Image (cartoon, rainbow, N blue to C red):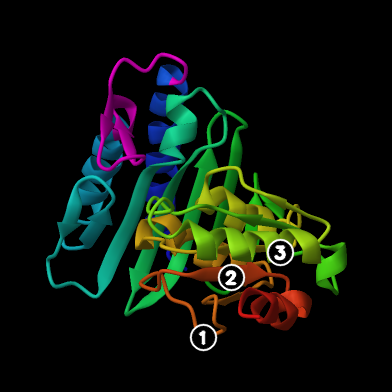
Amino acid sequence: MYDMAHEVADRAARSAGEVLKQKFGNVHHIGKKGEIDLVTEAEIAAEKIILEMLSKHFPKDNIQSEEAGVQDLSSNRTWIVDPLDGTTNFAHGFPFFAVSIGLEIDAEIVLGIVYNPVMDEFFEARKGQGAFLNDRPIHVSNARNMSDSLLATGFPYDIRERSNRIFERFRTMVLSSRGVRRAGSAAIDMCYVASGRLDGLWEENLKPWDTAAGVVIVSEAGGRLSTCDGQAFTPSQQSLVACTPMIHGELVKALNG
């Protein structure tokens, strides 16, 4: 199912990833969308490749992309694209970033691809067909409690305006778990939850392109998704919990304690 969409998204992600890999460590221009929110010429070039391929093969589909914005053709199909998730990492030569492409049909994410070109790790999932890393099936971990769990989070771009609450939650989670990692790519963090490298993730102030692909990858890997207050999650929600099902209740309780 979704074979054509998967084939095109696969090629688009790999082509964009190749551009990022070639330009990695050789960034000439870094722009600012906010005080700590960056954009690079590599991101723009990668996005151009993806959007051209999607528009060529699916000219009637909507597209929502981080830099180009929204192409609304009133379709029930929407591609949600982040050509470079982890821009700050990329700009600083830190090799933790990815291309993220998700397909939403009738308000449900049915296909997701997250590709880290430096590590050559290609995460993918289609609804009802499982989740995979480089063609090998993946599944969330068997962690049963927070104290034995390795977690991840990210800091929002407006952290300087509301740091007290963010650091309060961070302190709680550090003291309640085996450890917390903060590597700078929500898309990869979600895939690490899906593959059992992480047991859980929480983050705030996210955008649809940060999470769309990861939604189906985590779900198909047996994970649990919600907002930070435990409500049903969709990419339009700004807060996210993604974890192995056994620790979900404890994680949400800790975040809201």
- Which of the pair 81/49 is nearer the observer? 81
Q: Can you tell which quarter of the image residue 249 is in? A: bottom right
Q: Can you tell which quarter of the image residue 143 is in? A: bottom right
Q: Residue at left 34%, top 78%? A: 107
Image x and y of residue 229, in percent: 54, 82
Q: Mark 2 or mark 1: which comes first in sequence? A: 1
Q: Which residue is mark 3?
A: 173
Amino acid under disc 3: Met
Amino acid under disc 2: Val
In front: mark 3 or mark 2?
3
Vertical arrangement, residue 47 with respect to residue 174, above or below = above
Residue 121 as seen in the image, left or right of residue 251: left
- Which of the pair 224/56 is nearer the observer? 224
Q: Which residue is mark 1?
A: 231
**Residue 42 is inside the magenta segment:** yes
Circle 2 sits in a helix, a strand or a loop, which is it? strand
Res 77 visible: yes
Label 1, label 3: how far apart the Cα atoms are: 19 Å
Circle 3 sits in a helix, a strand or a loop, which is it? helix
Mark 3 residue crowding within 10 angstroms, few (<14) / some (14–19) / many (20+)? many
Q: Which residues are magenta?
A: 24-43
Mark 1 residue crowding within 10 angstroms, few (<14) / some (14–19) / many (20+)? some
Q: Which mark is residue 35?
A: none
Amino acid under disc 1: Gln
Q: Which residue is mark 2?
A: 241
Image x and y of residue 178, in percent: 83, 57
Label 2, label 1: how far apart the Cα atoms are: 10 Å
Circle 1 sits in a helix, a strand or a loop, which is it? loop
Q: Can you tell which quarter of the image residue 108 is in? A: bottom left
Image x and y of residue 32, in percent: 26, 35
